Image (cartoon, helix red, strand yellow):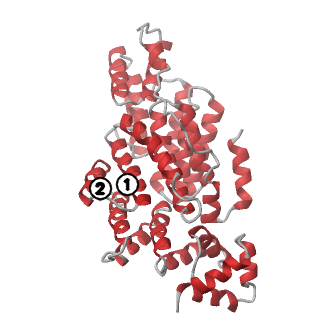
């Protein structure tokens, strides 16, 4: 029995559902459901909504989508199922899809190749610095929509290489390519790509000290609300963007980052967000930590020596202007203008009259041309989690 026929039979066998009520619940005309029953035509967004209508809770709907993604018989829906698995960080489903279509001779085969590279990166078996090499080894990608993803993935590589200039150069090109993706048949994948771009540039713009852009992209991610990890990371960057401007907002957003992380079930993320909040509070206390205290913090929260805050506090702990200037130069050479500015501000406030300090405190590299509104993919949250009733409150919270 065909996939669509089996779903419609399940609907008609239930006492609480009919094709008419389902059409109302997913906000489509009745003839849309009739066409789905006869021909199997449905958008991926509406398939997600349908999974919620037929489930008691989000967990059940996720299980339903897991099974459906492995049963789809439409080429377009199969392609979008790869992105669905990747964007919600379901590596088990993504691996199942890759293996299922590994010997596929159709256009789906390209998706297998590119998403296998992404899967290996997600599983830490492929270094971020090697993504572009693997994509080049794979060869020219024919599918124009998949080519957009490959360009986004190359930006992951540029980020690890600290080639931020390259990222900014092609950033607008990628955004324009995303805008060219059909809003009708490919709306879901289009919105996922916007989310990926927001993740990239939220991270990079904070380093480049472009605080306005950081906040913009952070709010896109928070409004989308598709994954606790990405939302926690976005709240962190939103909070850090206020570190030198508004203590209340900074700590408020860092606390929210920690609260979201606790819901993720990821111990390392929970510890990291707790660490971020604690170090921000220490920053506001304006006290000098001892090297012993810094090492204790590092061990307690499993931080590495190259953590930006750890480097910052070690420089302050040295009480040596020479070392602090070396760290400033280190941050600046890495295009980490945000932390370079923090060190410069500390030196300036302690009476260092070096002529470049005030300039470094305000130095930033701006990303020009932002093409997406902050609430442009709020519906991505509604499609994946079916949370229309909660989205309004989140938007109000972010506007404070």
Residue 389 location, quadrant: bottom right
The residue that appears at 56% across and 30% down in the rendered structure is 243
Q: Position of residue 281 (x, y in %)?
A: 56, 33
Q: Residue at x 57, y 81 (%)?
A: 40
Left or right, 289 with respect to 220, comes to left
The total number of labels drawn is 2
**Which quarter shows the C terminus?**
top right
* Rendered image: mark on residue 190: none
Q: Position of residue 172 (x, y in %)?
A: 47, 41
Circles 2 and 1: CB atoms closer than 8 Å = yes
Q: Secondary structure at mark 1?
A: helix
**Would residue 281 be seen by someone viewing this image from the given angle?**
no
Mark 1 neighbour density, 10 Å: few (under 14) some (14–19) many (20 or more): many
Q: Is 186 situated left or right of 126 in this image?
A: right
Residue 340 or 370: which is nearer the viewer? 370
Q: Is residue 279 left or right of residue 245?
A: left
Camera-side residue of 182 and 374: 182
- Which residue does the numbered mark 1 point to in the structure image? 150
- Mark 2–mark 1 Cα distance, whole angstroms, equals 7 Å
Q: Is residue 189 above or below residue 219?
A: below
Upstream in the sequence, badge 2 or badge 1?
2
Q: Secondary structure at mark 2?
A: helix
Quadrant assignment, res 47? bottom right
Q: Can residue 38 be seen from the camera position used here?
A: yes
Residue 236: percent from the left, percent from the top?
A: 54, 42
Q: Give the residue number, with chain letter if any, for mark 2.
A: 135
**Where is residue 104 drawn, in percent x and y?**
33, 77
| Residue 337 vs residue 37, the one in the foreground | 37
Tag 2: Cα neighbours inside 10 Å, few (<14), some, or many (≥20)? some
Q: Is residue 326 above or below residue 28?
A: above
Position above or below: 154 against 43: above
């Amino acid at each position: 029995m065909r996939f669509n026929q089996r779903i419609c039979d399940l609907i008609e066998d239930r006492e609480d559902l009919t094709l008419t009520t389902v059409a109302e619940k997913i906000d489509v005309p009745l003839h849309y459901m009739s066409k789905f029953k006869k021909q199997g035509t449905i958008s991926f967004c509406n398939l997600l909504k349908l999974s919620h209508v037929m489930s008691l809770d989000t967990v059940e709907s996720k299980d339903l989508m897991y099974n459906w993604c492995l049963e789809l018989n439409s080429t377009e829906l199969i392609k979008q199922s790869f992105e669905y698995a990747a964007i919600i960080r379901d590596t088990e489903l993504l691996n199942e899809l890759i293996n299922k279509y590994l010997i596929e001779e159709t256009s789906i085969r390209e998706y297998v190749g590119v998403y296998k590279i992404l899967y290996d990166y997600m599983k830490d078996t492929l270094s971020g610095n090697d993504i572009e090499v693997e994509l080049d080894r794979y060869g020219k990608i024919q599918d124009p929509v998949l080519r957009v993803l490959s360009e986004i993935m190359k930006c992951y590589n540029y980020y690890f290489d600290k080639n931020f200039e390259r990222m900014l150069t092609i950033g607008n090109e990628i955004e324009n390519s995303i805008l060219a993706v059909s809003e009708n048949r490919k709306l879901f994948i289009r919105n996922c790509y916007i989310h990926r771009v927001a993740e990239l540039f939220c991270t990079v713009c904070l380093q480049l000290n472009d605080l306005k852009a950081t906040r913009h992209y952070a709010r896109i991610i928070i409004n989308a609300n598709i994954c606790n990890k990405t939302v926690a990371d976005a709240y962190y960057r939103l909070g850090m963007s206020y570190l030198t401007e508004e203590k209340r907002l900074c700590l408020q957003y860092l606390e929210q980052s920690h609260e979201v992380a606790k819901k993720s079930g990821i111990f390392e993320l929970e510890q990291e967000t707790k660490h971020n909040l604690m170090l921000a509070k220490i920053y506001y206390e304006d006290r000098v930590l001892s090297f012993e205290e810094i090492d204790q913090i590092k061990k307690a929260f499993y931080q590495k020596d190259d953590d930006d805050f750890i480097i910052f506090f070690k420089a302050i702990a040295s009480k040596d202007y020479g070392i602090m200037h070396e760290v400033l130069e280190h941050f600046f050479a890495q295009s980490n203008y945000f932390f370079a500015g923090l060190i410069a501000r500390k030196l300036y406030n302690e009476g260092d009259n070096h002529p470049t300090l005030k300039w470094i405190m305000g130095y930033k590299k701006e990303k020009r041309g932002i093409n997406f509104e902050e609430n442009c993919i709020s519906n991505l949250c509604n499609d994946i989690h079916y949370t229309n009733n909660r989205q309004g409150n989140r938007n109000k919270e972010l506007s404070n």
